[in-house]
Image: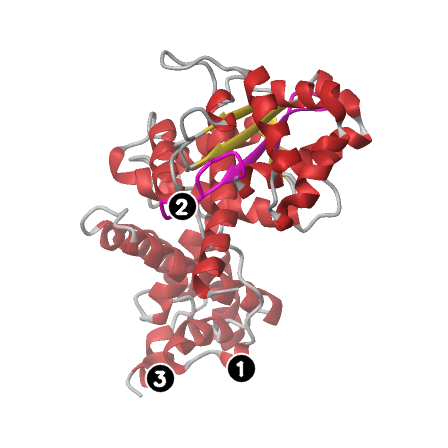
Amino acid sequence: MSNHQAVEQMLGYLYQVRYALYLLLEEDDEQARIGIEKFDDISFSYDDTSETMIQLKHHTKSYGDLNNASTDIWRTIKVWSDLINIDSSRLESTKFIIITTAKSPENSAACYLTPDSMELERNTKKAFEILKNTAESSQNVQHQGYYKSFIKLGDDLGKKLVNNIYIIDGSSNIIDVKVDIRKIIRYGSLPKYEDRICERLEGWWYDKAIEYLTSDQLLFITQKQIRSLISSIRDEYTEDNLPIDTPILDEIDIENLPEKDRLFYEQLRIICLSNQRMNLAIRDYYRAFKQRANWIRDDLLYINELDRYEERLIDEWQRMFLMMKEDLEEYGEELDEKTKQKLGKGLFNKIQDKDIRIRERCSEPFIMRGSYHSLANRLSVGWHIDFENRLRELLVR
């Protein structure tokens, strides 16, 4: 296969997945569900039986037309003919649709199978005659298997199949259909967030498509799932919220902590935090760091918003740190290291249980916890009463 053919084929696969999303968004019936299949491209179902089977054909060049001997048409007709030869009852409730970027030539079978328009009425009788004549007279060796499957149907089943075939030509290509998707979902979201919402939606959709295509069974995605997902994503991109798009990280070995990230770990070590809680703290630290970096990269934060958030965190810590200091002073000369560690751990626990949000509806606790670890890594906050003296030496190394 040439490089060009490989690219064309890959674009075809991606087009299939992206267009399936568009079709589901366009569907009027909220109970509709869609399946991306291994052999037939897409199927719509409204109960337990597929009612619409769709083949998608994508072309980046002018070739790939829909003439009467078109490979696109005949390869698809073979798939459907084989299905009908096994179970002819499918003709009673199934529409067969070809959606393609190519254009139907005038007076071709494809032209007569397009939906009724002001310029042209469907003529399935004429389309069947053209297809039957092509199947019986064509000398194309590579297409003989396609033609035999169609002829095997006989005239009655063949006419019924053709009567249920619709060809939608001149459809949006893989680039344009993304624009179509964006038009559908843009209502209810702020314009500056539209691109990000589209990316999140398509990312989820492609993951689901891969999951379903690698399954042994045909699985369906419902329009209800899509609408719920879009609503959830949109809800994150508002003035009082921020998206959470970083997954929970795998456990990070303490021994692999780089030198620049050692201070917040040492802060926890001197209050004798357990190794299990250390691991959770490291996870929160890196996850919050990555999430904050994503917000900055996507330009989702207001000017100095992170600085103001950290000021709030420091202010709350300072109040509680001074309370701890007063409690420790009551011990007088009896104050020992074990007591300092105990109250330091108590301060850390109280801070961990706080709910200080960067925005009102951005409620994931790891943001605050990880931000506190980041501040502790800069010695802007600390847990042990003597944290600055204990760790200042590490800071200047």
Quadrant of res 69: top right
Helix, strand or loop at label 2? It is loop
What's the residue at 41%, 58% (across, down)? 288
| Residue found at x 33% / y 75% | 388
Q: Is residue 85 above or below residue 174?
A: above
- Give the vertical position of 59 relative to 102 (above or below): below
Residue beneath the point at 63% across and 50% down: 142
- Mark toward the start of the polypeptide (2 vs 1): 2
Q: Residue at x 27, y 53 (%)?
A: 306
Q: Secondary structure at mark 1?
A: helix
Per the image, the residue denoted by label 3 is 394
Nearer to us in this view, 91 or 369: 91
Q: Quadrant of the C terminus?
A: bottom left
Q: Magenta segment, which residues?
A: 43-69
Looking at the image, residue 278 sits to the left or right of residue 102; the answer is right
Q: 12 or 334, which lies in front?
A: 12
Disc 2 residue type (three-letter): Tyr
Asked if residue 242 is among those painted magenta in the image, a careful observer would answer no
Residue topped by disc 1: 255
Q: In the rendered structure, which amino acid carries the disc numbered 3?
A: Leu
- Packing grade of label 1 (10 A; few <14, some 14-19, many >=20) is few
Is the residue 303 above or below the residue 395 in the image?
above
Q: Does the stretch in magenta take in 54?
A: yes
Q: Amino acid at mark 1?
A: Glu
- Toward the left, the furthest residue is 303
